Image (spheres, rainbow, N blue to C red):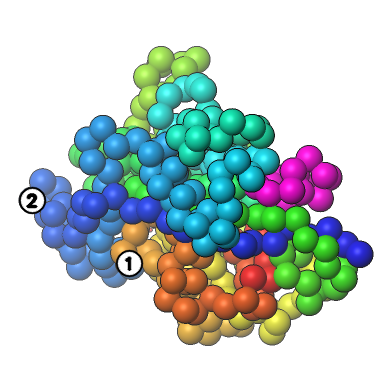
Amino acid sequence: MTLRAVATGVGHYLPERVVPNSEFESFLDTTDEWIRTRSGIERRHFAAEGETTSQMAIAAAKNALDMAGLQPDEIDAVVVATSTPDLTFPSVATMVQSGLGMTRGFAYDVQAVCAGFIFALTNANGLILSGQAERVLVIGAETFSRIMDWTDRSTCVLFGDGAGALVLEARTGSGTSQDRGILSCDLNSDGRYRDMLYVDGGVSTSGASGKLRMQGNPLFRQAVSKLTETAERALEKASLGSADVDWIVPHQANIRIIQGTAKKMGLPMEQVIVTVQDHGNTSAASIPLALSVGVQEGKIREGQLLVTEAIGGGLAWGSVVIRW
Ligand code: ACO
């Protein structure tokens, strides 16, 4: 018997305000056409004034708990992936814990920018396999609109806000790749690339939260090869290959990166969950948002094989293979 971390619930939350590309045309030298053709983004959601990362995380978590049929106090651990916390500390995860009315368990944040959910999921899997927790809430939640430079057309049109959550529960499997649950993980980072994507402020430097800076084109060139490599490595660790995959659930940064990765993996776009047109790049929230939308639309079904992959600031990148 092998212990497995099985997804039993998924949910998401998107802020009410939807911002179409055309809104940027009024204050930037850009067009709906440029944004659509270069990134695949058509609209994104922006948090309302006063709406925080933890509030969105709590809303997504409630939806995931509902689907799993669990009460908050049945959860042992909350792991939140975010780069845009409400405060420097305490963690968003502890705010989620209190917001859900949990009086037990433990909670902490993980920060690996757009790859954050992959790192959090790997971490939560480790908690379950090592017996630290039986039920873990894994959340990706971001308010990237708060770190945008609204005069920089090369970044501010790309990002959005939102949250997605997953409930993982310990179950026993047979130890084969037919088991439901997380089958393998692959994590990578390389700090030599840290200047490619960063925020120009922080606690021990400027004392302010800063604005996002990105060298989009060099990052774009890194993305497809690194994402394909990590997804293929994760599949190999589970003794699987691309032919076994039902769905790629990629980080939603740019449709051209998503298409390039699917092509390199030899899979058609019909087997890729795509939400970038509606959400933009929501950083650590993008994969759980895509999972939740994919389930809601009836695409992702129990027993199917999913490969998730993401790359972001650091650079940090990785992949998790899950049988749903
Ligand atoms: N509207 C009009 N023109 C623009 C805009 C805009 N919004 N933004 C940039 N341009 C211009 C540039 O100034 C440039 O003009 P120039 O040729 O006169 O200098 C031209 O468009 C082309 O710019 P490129 O940067 O070469 O365009 P590219 O095809 O690379 O697309 C993009 C840019 C969309 C940013 C792409 O590079 C990309 O998606 N990069 C990767 C982003 C990513 O994956 N990030 C990782 C995750 S994010 C995270 O971790 C937080």
Q: In the image, is the residue at mark 2 within 8 Å of ligand 1 by its beta carbon?
A: no
Q: In the image, is 17 to the left or to the right of 113?
A: left
Q: Secondary structure at mark 2?
A: loop
Q: Which region is colored magenta? A: 123-136
101 over 185 or under it: above or below: above
Is 170 or 118 nearer to us in this picture? 170
120 inside magenta stretch: no
112 over 272 or under it: above or below: above
Q: Which residue is mark 1?
A: 277
Q: Where does the image place residue 130, in percent across and percent down from the top left? A: 83, 45
Residue 133 makes an appearance in the image: yes
Q: Quadrant of the C terminus?
A: bottom right
How packed is label 1: few (under 14 Cα within 10 Å), some, or many (20 or more)?
some
Q: In the image, is 140 to the left or to the right of 281?
A: right
Q: Quadrant of the N terminus?
A: bottom right
Q: Where does the image place residue 20, in percent across and percent down from the top left? A: 19, 59
Which residue sits at x=22%, y=35%?
A: 49
Which residue sits at x=48%, y=84%?
A: 270
Which residue sits at x=81%, y=50%?
A: 129
Residue 122 makes an appearance in the image: no
Is 287 or 51 nearer to us in this picture? 51
How packed is label 2: few (under 14 Cα within 10 Å), some, or many (20 or more)?
few
Q: Which residue is mark 2?
A: 26
- Amino acid type at circle 1 is Gln
Is 77 or 48 nearer to us in this picture? 77
- Amino acid type at circle 2 is Ser
Q: Secondary structure at mark 1?
A: helix
